[in-house]
Image (spheres, grey):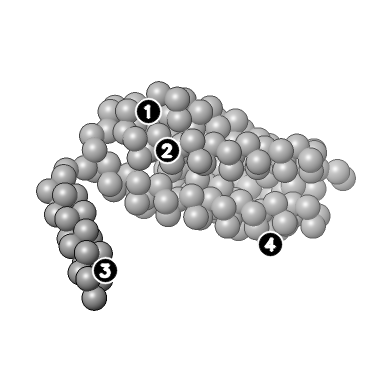
Amino acid sequence: MRASCLFATAMLLCLAGTAGKAAEPASAADRSFVAMVSQGGMFEVEAGTAAATQGSTQDIRDQGTTEQHDHGLVGDKLKRTAAAAGLSFPGALNQRFSRELAALKAAQGSQFDALYLQDMDDIHAKDGAAFAKEASGGTNLGLRAFATETHRIVLRHIGELRAIGPAKS
């Protein structure tokens, strides 16, 4: 009984200590990071979904499923982390990524595979650099921790994409 009372008291003290705290501030660089990688992540989910069904090889289909799954989870975590920092998260792809996705979905067979691999190579290189920069210099500790964790996922995806190599005819 006494142990449960001590536990309950400790929990109340923890909650009381955090209840009045405002969201940790985010710098302009942190806001730019969230804006950039949220778009890239949403694109990777949508492109991965397309690859899972349109890929002409099992490697492409499997890698698409990985993108869809991993970046879906990463996007959910980014939404929570951004919200804790007082930042908004876009609800849809911007025009640039919408056009890229439409072009990808219009391709078929080995053309689809080649375009998918090129798109994934490009986005992972750009977002990977953004994650590395935020991980080492972000001002918001939550976003910085998120970037550190997620950068490892991006590096793993780059390795998977390189293992697949260019699409074969």
Task: Please give the count of numbered marks on the rendered protein.
Answer: 4
Quarter of the figure that contains the C terminus:
top right
Q: Which residue was labeled with disc 1?
A: 138
The answer to whether residue 15 is above or below residue 83 is below
Amino acid at circle 2: Ala
Name the residue at 64% across, 54% down: 66
Q: Using the numbered discs, state the Cα–Cα distance from disc 2 to disc 3 in whole angstroms.
A: 34 Å
Between label 1 and label 3, give the one nearer the viewer: 3
Residue 9: percent from left, percent from top = 18, 62
Disc on res. 128: none
Q: Which residue was labeled with disc 4?
A: 53
Residue 79: percent from left, percent from top = 36, 50
Residues at badges 3 and 4 in contact (C-beta under 8 Å)? no
Q: Which residue was labeled with disc 2?
A: 145
Q: Which residue was labeled with disc 3?
A: 3
Q: Using the numbered discs, state the Cα–Cα distance from disc 1 to disc 3 in whole angstroms.
A: 41 Å
User: Mark 2: few, some, or many residues within 10 Å (few <14, many ≥20)?
Assistant: some
